[in-house]
Amino acid sequence: TIVEGPHKGKVATIKRMSRAQLFLYSQFKSEHSGIFVVRSRSCVLTGGTKTRSAGGANPGASPMSTPGFNTPQSDNGRGPLRGERDESLMGKTVRIQAGQWKGYLGTVSHTTATHVQVELHSRLKKVMVVKDRVHVVGDKFGA
């Protein structure tokens, strides 16, 4: 559902995602075969399915993440194997602000003292980014 701009209130299907733009299709729009472009920030996801978690799986983990990568535990069960991790960013949606992946949105799947691993929304790819180059995004619509 589009919440702002000239197409406000319309419901459409996402055909393509490209950085900050969504290419949407609406059967009620006859111009350009029903295809139009809006910024991703002006849309809210409606419908969809509930996230299913398998027995014993990490409920906060992304379905695209590697199962053992989210919660590495030492043999004594006291915590992560290497160094301290900043858990405050885990699972958050972030926007990369600088570097090769500038402008991309993604979900944080792993953190270290200086870097975060981000699962990009628009590509099936995980990238390591310096923590200072990411910014947590979100607004009143939950985007």
Image: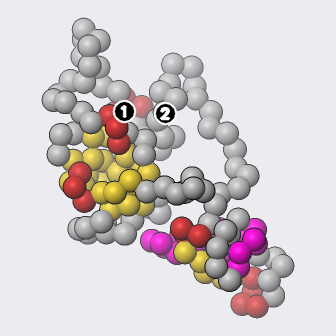
Residue 89 horizontal side relative to residue 34, left or right: left
Question: Is 22 covered by the magenta stretch?
Answer: yes
Which residue of the protein is positioned furthest toward the front in this rendering?
140
Quadrant of the drawing holding the N terminus: bottom right
* Disc 1, SS: loop
Q: Quadrant of residue 102?
A: bottom left
> Please, is residue 73 above or below residue 135 in the view?
above
Q: Earlier in the sequence, mark 2 or mark 1?
A: 2
* Disc 2, SS: loop
What residue sits 71% from the left and 55% below the top? 46
Is there CB contact under 8 Å for labels 2 and 1? yes
Q: Amino acid at mark 1?
A: Asn
Q: Which label is found at residue 45?
A: none
Q: Position of residue 68 (x, y in %)?
A: 36, 29
What residue sits 55% from the left and 69% below the top? 40
Q: Nearer the viewer, residue 87 or 71?
A: 87
Q: Nearer the viewer, residue 24 or 123?
A: 24
What residue sits 43% from the left and 57% below the top? 137
Label 1 sits on residue: 70
- Total labels: the figure holds 2
Q: Quadrant of residue 109?
A: top left
Q: Amino acid at mark 2?
A: Gly
Q: Position of residue 139 (x, y in %)?
A: 52, 57
Q: Position of residue 73 (x, y in %)?
A: 29, 20
Label 2 sits on residue: 60
Could you give the CA–CA distance between mark 2 and mark 1, rounded to whole angstroms? 9 Å
